[in-house]
Image (cartoon, grey):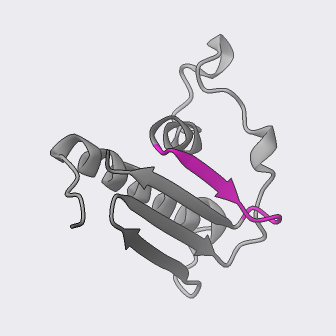
Amino acid sequence: MPYKPDEHRLFEIKLCVEEALRNAMVHGNGSDASKSVKVSYSIDNDTVIIEVEDEGVGFDHEKLPDPTKEENIMKTSGRGVYLIKKIMDTVEFNDSGNRIKMTKRFK
């Protein structure tokens, strides 16, 4: 029987999907309404896997500034991927950086 996630985990998953979608639309696609964002997901008993892919050129996810460092604390952006990595169990990017794969276990 599939496991049902609690409200806290559902909130975390929704937050990460929202962050990934916003990053894809704003940063990946440059807010260009003619470009699309692909979303796919699968649920297998106690695990959800979500992928978000934009039409942008991507970015180097290894070189993101740490939003917890003093020089970045007051910046108004730059926390989305950090939050996703803190909340989800695994986070992977494709080589070009325009697709993110997020995994979260419900237990």
Magenta stretch: includes residue 18: no
In the rendered image of this protein, does residue 25 appear above or below residue 32?
above
Q: Residue at x 48, y 78 (%)?
A: 40
Q: Is residue 100 left or right of residue 76?
A: right
Q: Residue at x 62, y 60 (%)?
A: 27
Q: Is residue 2 left or right of residue 86?
A: left
> Relative to the observer, which residue lies in front, 62 or 41?
41
Asked if residue 19 shows in the view, the reply is no
Q: Residue at x 22, y 41 (%)?
A: 8
x, y percent for residue 57? 78, 70
> Relative to the observer, which residue lies in front, 100 or 73?
100
Quarter of the figure with the C terminus = top left
In the rendered image of this protein, does residue 35 appear above or below residue 100?
below
Q: Is residue 74 left or right of residue 3?
A: right
In the image, the segment drawn in magenta is 88-97
* Prevailing secondary structure class for the magenta stretch in the rendered image: loop
x, y percent for residue 70? 63, 11
Quarter of the figure with the N terminus = bottom left
Q: Farthest residue in the top direction?
A: 70
Magenta stretch: includes residue 90: yes
> Relative to the observer, which residue lies in front, 102 or 2?
2
Asked if residue 90 shows in the view, the reply is yes
Q: Quadrant of residue 68?
A: top right
Q: Quadrant of residue 18?
A: bottom left
Q: Farthest residue in the front direction?
A: 1
Q: Residue at x 37, y 70 (%)?
A: 43
In the rendered image of this protein, does residue 66 appear above or below residue 41?
above
x, y percent for residue 91? 60, 51
x, y percent for residue 95? 82, 64
